[in-house]
Amino acid sequence: MVSYGPCKLPRKRRSKTEIAEAQAEPEEAPDPSQPPEHKYALPELGCMLVKIGNGLRRQCQLKHPVSQRSTWECSRCKVTLCAVCFVPYHKDKNLM
Ligand SMILES: [Zn+2]
Ligand SMILES: [Zn+2]
């Protein structure tokens, strides 16, 4: 006679930290569907960083401790910005 006893599988219990990690929202998870250029485009504002063209360089409109000339401008605002200033310029108007 074969006895079919309850199959005892080892139950993996999740520790509290594991659960917290699984529930925590990732702060800045990279979105693989977004191209790397998303840093230089703000679709919600319709703004995009584009090359000024003709090899021109203009003074970045944000305050820099030293003169910062950029070959980029916002296509909508028509403001010269360097790559690092593009997002701060649009997100923090106090910098203007
Ligand atoms: Zn803009
Ligand atoms: Zn700048």
Image: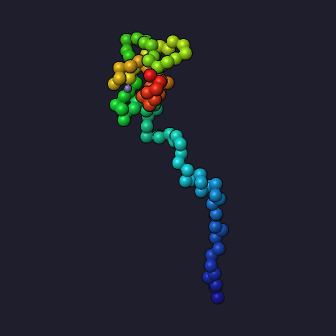
- Quarter of the image for the N terminus: give it: bottom right
What residue lies at 55% left-to-right and 53% top-to-bottom? 23
Where residue 31 sits: x, y (%)? 47, 40
- 43 up-or-down from 83: above or below: below
Asked where in the image residue 4 lies, by quadrant, the reply is: bottom right
Q: Quadrant of the C terminus?
A: top left
* Residue 87 in view (yes/no): no
Q: Determine the residue positioned at 52% across, 17% down.
A: 64
Q: Residue at x 40, y 24 (%)?
A: 49
Where does ligand 1 appear, by image quarter?
Answer: top left
Total numbered circles = 0
Q: Residue furthest bottom?
A: 1
76 vs 15, left or right, is left
Report which quarter residue 56 is drawn in: top left
Give residue 15's position: percent from left, percent from top. 65, 59
Outermost residue, front side: 94
The image shows residue 38 at horizontal and vertical percentages of 43, 32
Query: In this view of the protein, which residue sits in the foreground, 61 or 71?
Result: 61
Q: Decide which of 45, 22 is in the foreground and name it.
A: 45
